[in-house]
Image: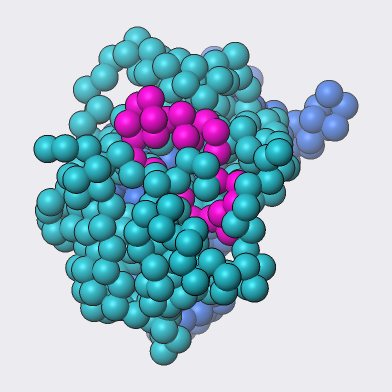
Chain colours: A cyan, B blue
Amino acid sequence: MDRQTEEIVRVEGITFSYDSVPALLDINLSIYRGDFLAIIGPNGSGKTTLLKIIVGLLKPQKGRVWLFGQPQETFGDWFRLGYIQQKATNFDPVFPISVEEVIATSLHSVRRLKGLSRKQVKEKIGEALRTVGLEQLARKPMNSLSGGQQQRVLIARALASEPEILLLDEPTTGVDHPAQENFYDFLGQLNQEKTLTIVLVTHDYGIVNRHVNRVACLNQKLIYHGQHAEFCQSSIVQELLRGGHHLVSHRH
Amino acid sequence: MSQSLLFSGLLLRAVVAGSLLGLACGLLGVFLVLRRDAMISHGLSHLAFAGVALGLLLNLMPVLVSVGICLLGSLLILQLKEQGKLPGDTLIGILSSAGMALAIFLMSVKRDFGAELVAYLFGDILAIAPLEVYLAAGLVCLVLAGIFFNFPRLVFMTFDRDSAAASGIPVKKLDRLLVVLTAVTIVLGIRVVGLLLVTGLTVIPAASALQLSPNFRLTLFLSSIFSLLSIIGGILLAYLFNLPASAAIIFLALFLFGLSFLFKKLS
């Protein structure tokens, strides 16, 4: 099947409320192989909730999710999805874990990869860390790294099990501006060179829009879902600008 | 101390049972402390005390009755915690009070087992029976196997619960496993140091290891070593100087914690 036409995630009529507070209303969305999809919207618009529903952390009150053509309820190949949650680097600062242990525990946990030998695991860890440019930090304690480096380690952990889609929820929160640009360039590279499908929840569309090919704009309802180029010309852009979103790249 | 005395059945049994328990506490304690579940052992120890009283009342093996009651209590607390209606520490407060109230009530029903109950309150490892050593060995093997076969998944879940769940790891099942293993360990622990000090046995060695270790494997190793040193050293000190073993064990664990803390400060 053609890249960009193979639907790997389908969200069908999703409605979700926290107790009686509605978060998402009748959301329909498709993600295609090779997409770099940005999910944008104001605070409390349901972006994080949508991502959590896609990866199975929350169960919607209405609607269904399809992953790689299978209904989510019967889907078992979770290694095909990599997920990096919001504030992922806000882990317990006293947690004693080295960079290679962060990746190894994830690798050993993945059903498909359980039979790997110690040598193969080491190779996979090395490969994942090389991809994110942190090979020399394998034995360092996680809590001794900077926020940007920790973020890259978590990407390496997600990449080690060779996912086909990477879902990231505001991954650069707390990371300085130049490091954010580098990070998004790196995601763009993964999307282009490794044909990894990327779904990114972000507040700062301007910094990431050079890499994005599709946009989903949420505010409990799905306001827009389509190509990046068309999105830039739509009236929604003006509304978002009034809402404090950065839509123009900061790079000069 | 003469060799015959050192290797007398009494001391040997205490050291064997203590070492097995030390290993289980050392390993499990790291997970409990890092999951912020350290106080669950406090709640379960009080419930175990009710199990001991019930066992003595019904003339059944108190350890086994305690294991049963603790398993029920631990699964109930987990269920209530998952429903998110009350904070975990509140639930533990309710559980420990309920356990203690039940124990006191059962003690009032039959008044002549006070001395035996006191042994469970303060621990009496030097009086441990051969059958209890075998039972401890069996239960500790269960705990070690539970940790060993789920090790990477337990570490992943403890470090980053949501990512682990999104990777398909059954985090709720593993929560149950951990709480069941804790219940078993606590029941064995109250025989060694008593219900009043058993929380120290799960928490202090892990807290000491956390002062020193840069990675998870070393933390588990150090925690187990500190736990073993405290228990074996405590038993020997108690034997040599006629001290209460439970207090000697916890004092030694605290001493090692103090050393680890100082070492971290100075390094």
Number of numbered discs visible in the structure rendering? 0
Q: Give the quadrant of the C terminus of chain A.
A: top right
Considering every residue shown, the one lying at the far front of the view is: A233
Q: Is residue B217 left or right of residue A5?
A: right
- Residue drawn at (45%, 15%), measured in percent from left and top? A126
In the image, residue B131 sits, relative to residue B92, either above or below, namely above
Q: Is residue B84 magenta?
A: no
Q: Which x, y percent locates residue A176?
A: 73, 42
Instruction: Indicate the position of residue A198 as horizontal and vertical percent values.
Output: 39, 43
Front residue of this view, candidates B164 and A172: A172
Q: Is residue B126 above or below residue A240?
A: above
Classify residue B76 as left or right of residue B104.
Answer: left
Outermost residue to the top: A119
Task: Compare residues B155 and B91 and report the one nearer the observer.
Answer: B155
Write down the quadrant of residue A164 in the picture.
Answer: top left
Q: Which residues are magenta?
A: A184-208
Q: Residue farthest to the right? A: B266
Q: Which of these two is toward me, B68 or A22?
A: A22
Quadrant in which the N terminus of chain A appears: top left
Q: Residue at x 42, y 16 (%)?
A: A127
Q: What residue appears at the point 63 percent right and 38 percent down from the top-left corner? A: A181
Q: Is residue A15 visible?
A: yes
Residue B146's place in the image compared with B267, above or below, is below
Q: Is residue A189 magenta?
A: yes
Residue found 43% across the figure and 40% down from its top: B156
